[in-house]
Image: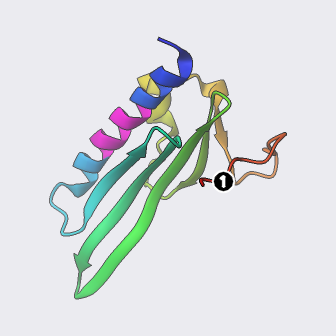
């Protein structure tokens, strides 16, 4: 199995596990959204809390050139350590919001 296929599986497993854990005992559900065709992976919060509608991205990562680009991570602990524990190389995880990370080429837009 190639690296990208393995990384897709690891990310999906981690997101599904986190969605179960974060949804447990919570009125707002956390839903994993995994799009391996476009290599986009999200956790979305959805539901009602204190008479207010909640819909927000909790986590967003994408695979690009064999790297896991974490675009946003609003989980308490952060999911990088979970991804590493699942088998993704630490050197293949980039925090896209850091100024130090600049891709050499533009990321493709989904058509």
Q: Residue furthest toward the top? A: 1
9 to the left or right of 5: left
Q: Quadrant of residue 51?
A: bottom left
Identify which residue is drawn at 40% across, 45% down: 34
The one of 69 and 8 positioned closer to us in this rendering: 8
Q: Main secondary structure of the magenta part?
A: helix
Could you tell me which secondary element the residue under label 1 belongs to?
Answer: loop
Within-10-Å neighbours for mark 1: few <14, some 14–19, many 20+: few
Asked if residue 87 is positioned above or below residue 97 in the image, the reply reads above
| Residue 68, percent from left and from top | 59, 36
Asked if residue 81 is positioned above or below residue 27 in the image, the reply reads above
Magenta stretch? 10-18
Rendered-image quadrant of the C terminus: bottom right
Would residue 14 be counted in the magenta stretch? yes
Q: Residue furthest toward the left? A: 25
Identify which residue is drawn at 30% across, 82% down: 53
Asked if residue 72 is positioned above or below residue 11 in the image, the reply reads below
The one of 12 and 92 positioned closer to us in this rendering: 12
| Residue 52, percent from left and from top | 28, 86
The one of 59 and 9 positioned closer to us in this rendering: 9
Identify which residue is drawn at 47% across, 32% down: 83
According to the picture, the residue beneath numbered tag 1 turns out to be 109
| Residue 4, percent from left and from top | 54, 24
101 to the left or right of 65: right
Would residue 1 be counted in the magenta stretch? no
Q: Residue furthest toward the front? A: 111
């Amino acid at each position: 199995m190639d690296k990208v296929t393995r990384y897709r599986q690891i990310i999906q497993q981690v997101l599904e596990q986190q969605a179960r854990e974060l949804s447990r005992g919570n009125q707002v559900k956390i839903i994993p959204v995994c799009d391996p065709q476009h290599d986009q992976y999200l956790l979305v919060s959805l539901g009602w809390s204190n008479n207010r509608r909640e819909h927000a991205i909790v986590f967003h990562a994408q695979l690009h050139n064999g790297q896991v680009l974490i675009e946003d991570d609003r989980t308490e602990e952060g999911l990088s350590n979970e991804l590493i524990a699942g088998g993704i190389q630490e050197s293949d995880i980039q925090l896209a919001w850091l100024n130090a990370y600049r891709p050499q080429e533009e990321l493709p837009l989904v058509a």
